[in-house]
Image (cartoon, rainbow, N blue to C red):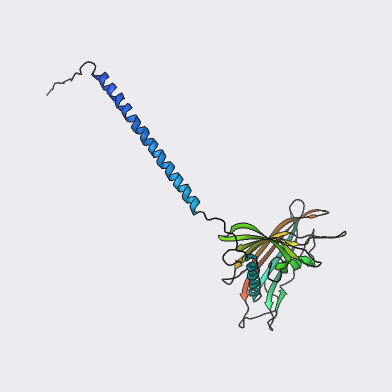
Amino acid sequence: MGGEVVTQARAPGAEAAIAVASRVREVELRPLKIRATAAAAAASMFVFIVASYSATAVAAPPEDPPENWIHRVAARETETEAARSHYTYRQIATVEDFDPKGLKTGLYKEIREVVFSPTGERTEQLVGKPVMRLDRIKLTAEDFRDLREVQPALIAKETLFLYDRQYRGEDTVDGIDCWMLEIRPKQILAGERLFDGTLWIDKRDFSTIRTSGQAVPQIRTLKDENLFPRFTTVRSKIDGDHWFPAKTLGDDVLQFRTGPQRIRLTVDYSNYQRFGAESKITFGDAKP
């Protein structure tokens, strides 16, 4: 079967009229688009301003420590050291020296147990024989004294008067908000070993949780030099309340008259156990 094709004719000039109408419509809509774009930009700017204001408003201003905070720090440190005196623990000290090319040339290592005697007296016990193979330096009595007196513990109520103190702002250590306290010896008498550096103080209870500095004085005479490295001691909360030394690290270049000498110091404190009536004390070489 077949069919007829019907063609609809347009009047002359109709296509031109349609094109003109479309352009007119576009011109009419353009101001609307511009107004919509401007409104969106204004809304975005408003959101940005509000967000910026909110962020500024939420940020807490720096919190200055209270007036008597340094005395509370010293009292807390005295309390912490008193608590630590009832604990046994192991202390592993390592000192390494290096040649000018950075290669390790020597090693000193000792292991000590801090224990209580059967009469309840607290004492140190050397475990095995120390490794004594340092090549470029030698350890002195002051080095061993610093291991026991300066690096693990700092200002207490009875030593606070020895130091000038300066507030150095705020910091965060492992998520803990801290005040920073700089201490420097007012003067150093013959035979004294003191600390020169910075303490990080927990804002919540005035505990010292980190220290960084140097044992002083450096000792120089016409014949000898006895220099000491900078170090950092980090602490851990051992008994749920007090922060005890956990690790001391030092990697420093000592400026001897004969030339610079790099050394590395590591002290690990572990196996903290509170001494009590049921504690069992054993003597003899323990396995490292």
Residue extending furthest toward the right: 222
User: Which quadrant of the view contains residue 8?
Assistant: top left
Please give left or right for residue 237 compared with residue 41 in the image: right
Visible residue check, residue 18: yes
> Which quadrant of the figure contains the C terminus?
bottom right
Towards the viewer: 137 or 54: 54
Instruction: From the top left corner, tell me how far across and down residue 43 is, in percent.
Output: 40, 42
Towards the viewer: 8 or 110: 8
Instruction: From the top left corner, tell me how far across and down residue 31 is, in percent.
Output: 35, 30
Q: Residue at x 45, y 48 (%)?
A: 51
Visible residue check, residue 284: no
> Which quadrant of the figure contains the N terminus?
top left
Towards the viewer: 175 or 224: 175
Q: Residue at x 32, y 30 (%)?
A: 29
Instruction: From the top left corner, tell me how far across and down residue 151 is, in percent.
Output: 70, 65
User: Which quadrant of the view contains residue 177?
Assistant: bottom right
Q: Eyeballing the image, is 199 above or below 124?
A: above
Total count of labels: 0
Instruction: From the top left corner, tell me how far across and down residue 101 is, in percent.
Output: 75, 50
User: Which quadrant of the view contains residue 231?
Assistant: bottom right
Residue extending furthest toward the top: 12
Q: Eyeballing the image, is 283 above or below 46?
A: below
Residue extending furthest toward the front: 67
